[in-house]
Image (cartoon, coloured by chain):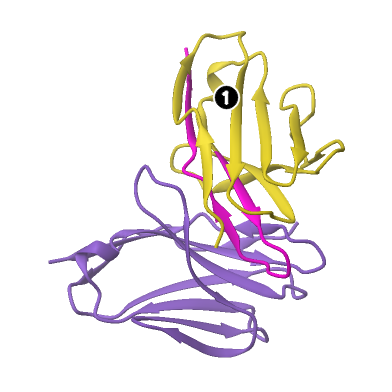
């Protein structure tokens, strides 16, 4: 069974610090990787996606992918209280646009 | 990105009844999906809504309980049938555009079964 593993947290970081969120996946054939942000009571919002090994940066967000280690991470620089949310890692195994979601990591940014 | 709307946003239903949730996308999408998210849990895929044909259900979900329609490229419905309190959850519609793999979600329908 294809699995996506995340630490449910909560992960607490002070305002202005770097938040590091991690995710591992079991299917070595996975091809596309996504990070969603979900505020309490709201639907998931896509914030980053990455397909190739290495880093991808978008503003304060950096997604990192290491296919050899089956590991994907999300770094949030200069964390703000508004970043407090649950971050869901999702993985697509290719050939079909269906993704598997992790349980999500709850991030708390302390002012 | 696609803008997705759902109706109703929330409902409280009695055991044994059925509720139909509507999902509308503002642009044509190649794939539409229905998810369930129970309190404190991640998203669980119920089925893929196929245009003009029967939906493709994931393990543990059956058509008699969750009938799905998708009459065109921008609209789909999910019915939760013969509801029990265990069906209380948030139901989410999502879509994927042509040539991409990123999924976008509707605002969700919060269902409470009493």
Is residue A19 left or right of B99 when viewed as pictured? left
Magenta-drawn stretch contains B95:
yes
Q: Callout 1: few (<14), some (14-19), or many (20+) C-alpha neighbours within 10 Å?
A: some
Residue B103 or residue A50, whichever sits in front: B103
Residue A28 image-quadrant placement: bottom right
Residue closest to the far bottom: A54
Which chain's residue wears label 1? B
Magenta-drawn stretch contains B106:
yes
Residue closest to the far left: A111
Q: Residue drawn 51% across and 25% down?
A: B88
Q: Residue drawn 64% across and 86% down?
A: A52
Which region shows up in magenta? B92-114
Q: Position of residue B1 (x, y in %)?
A: 55, 63
Query: Mark 1 falls on what kind of element?
Result: helix
Say above or below: A101 vs A16.
above
Q: Colour of chain B?
A: yellow
Residue B46 or residue B51, whichever sits in front: B51
Q: Position of residue A109 (x, y in %)?
A: 22, 66
Q: Position of residue A53 (x, y in %)?
A: 62, 89
Q: In which quadrant is the C terminus of chain A drawn?
A: bottom left
Q: Residue drawn 56% across and 57% down?
A: B2
Residue A54 image-quadrant placement: bottom right
Q: Position of residue B62 (x, y in %)?
A: 78, 29
Residue A79 or residue B20, whichever sits in front: B20
Say above or below: B80 vs A7.
above
Chain that is coloured purple in the picture: A
Q: How many marks?
A: 1
Q: In which quadrant is the N terminus of chain A drawn?
A: bottom right
Q: Which residue is mark 1?
A: B87
Say above or below: A5 vs B40.
below
């Amino acid at each position: 069974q294809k699995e996506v593993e995340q630490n449910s947290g909560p992960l607490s970081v002070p305002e202005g610090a770097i938040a590091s969120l991690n995710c591992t996946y079991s299917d070595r054939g996975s091809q596309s990787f996504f990070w969603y942000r979900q505020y309490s009571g709201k639907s998931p919002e896509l914030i980053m996606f990455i397909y190739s090994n290495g880093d991808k940066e978008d503003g304060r967000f950096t997604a990192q992918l290491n296919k050899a280690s089956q590991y994907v991470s999300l770094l949030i620089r200069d964390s703000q209280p508004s970043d407090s949310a649950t971050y869901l890692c999702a993985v697509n195994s290719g050939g079909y646009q269906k993704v598997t979601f992790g349980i999500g990591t709850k991030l708390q940014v302390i002012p | 990105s696609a803008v997705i709307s759902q109706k109703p946003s929330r409902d409280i239903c009695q055991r044994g009844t059925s509720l139909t949730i509507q999902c509308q996308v503002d642009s044509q999408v190649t794939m539409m999906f229905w998810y369930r998210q129970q309190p404190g849990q991640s998203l669980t895929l119920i089925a893929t809504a196929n245009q003009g044909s029967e939906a493709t259900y994931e393990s543990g979900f059956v058509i008699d309980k969750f009938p799905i329609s998708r009459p065109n490229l921008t609209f789909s419905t999910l019915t939760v049938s013969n509801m029990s309190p265990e069906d209380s959850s948030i139901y989410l519609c999502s879509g994927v555009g042509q040539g991409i793999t990123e999924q976008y979600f509707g605002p969700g329908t919060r269902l409470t079964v009493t």
